[in-house]
Image: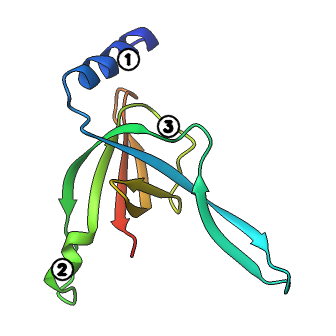
């Protein structure tokens, strides 16, 4: 599939309303406090804001130690493009909720990016 076909496919899905949400990817920033200690925070990654996306599924963990509410913390999010700069350990913010990215993959055609995420408290 060439680049033009991929772009047209993404635009078509957007026009059909498949990607119902928008998200922004956040990268970790470390600054130094006056005391010399590190201050860690997350800020919007350049070029990775207001990305059309959709929640594909809720993932469950197969551990007997997790409570029912714990199983609702894991999700899979599909982004409407290929974003090779997104890495595990970054966060994604969608609908005012932050999620920690645990895995990043691309669909076989290279049209979409799939994020496995955990809700960040």
Viewport quadrant of the C terminus: bottom left
Mark 1 or 2, nearer chain start = 1
Mark 2 or 3, nearer chain start = 2
* Residue occupying the point 45% across, 33% down: 82
- The label shown at residue 69 is 2
Disc 2 residue crowd, few under 14, some 14–19, many 20+, Cα 10 Å = few
- Residue 91 vs 34, above or below: the answer is above
* Residue occupying the point 28% across, 53% down: 76
**Where is residue 110 shown, x and y percent of the image?**
40, 29
- The label shown at residue 119 is none
Q: How many angstroms separate mark 1 from mark 2 (CA)?
A: 38 Å
- Residue 105 vs 4, above or below: the answer is below
- Mark 1 touching mark 2, by CB under 8 A? no
**Where is residue 7 shown, x and y percent of the image?**
39, 16
Secondary structure found at label 2: helix
Secondary structure found at label 3: loop
| Residue 111 lies in quadrant | top left
Residue carrying label 3: 83
* Residue occupying the point 44% across, 55% down: 92
Instruction: Give the number of callouts.
Output: 3
Disc 3 residue crowd, few under 14, some 14–19, many 20+, Cα 10 Å = some
Secondary structure found at label 1: helix
Residue carrying label 1: 6
Q: Residue furthest bottom?
A: 65
| Residue 75 lies in quadrant | bottom left
């Amino acid at each position: 599939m060439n680049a033009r076909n991929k772009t047209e496919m993404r635009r078509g899905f957007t026009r059909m309303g498949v990607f119902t949400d928008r998200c922004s990817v956040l990268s970790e920033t470390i600054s130094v406090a006056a005391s010399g200690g590190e201050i860690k925070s997350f800020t919007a990654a350049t070029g990775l804001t207001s990305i059309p996306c959709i929640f594909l599924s809720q993932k469950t963990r197969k551990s007997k130690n997790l409570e029912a509410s714990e199983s609702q913390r894991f999700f899979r999010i599909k982004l409407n493009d290929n974003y090779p700069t997104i890495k595990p350990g970054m966060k994604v913010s969608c609908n005012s909720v932050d999620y920690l990215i645990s895995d990043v993959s691309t669909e076989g055609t290279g049209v979409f990016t799939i994020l496995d995420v955990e809700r960040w408290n």
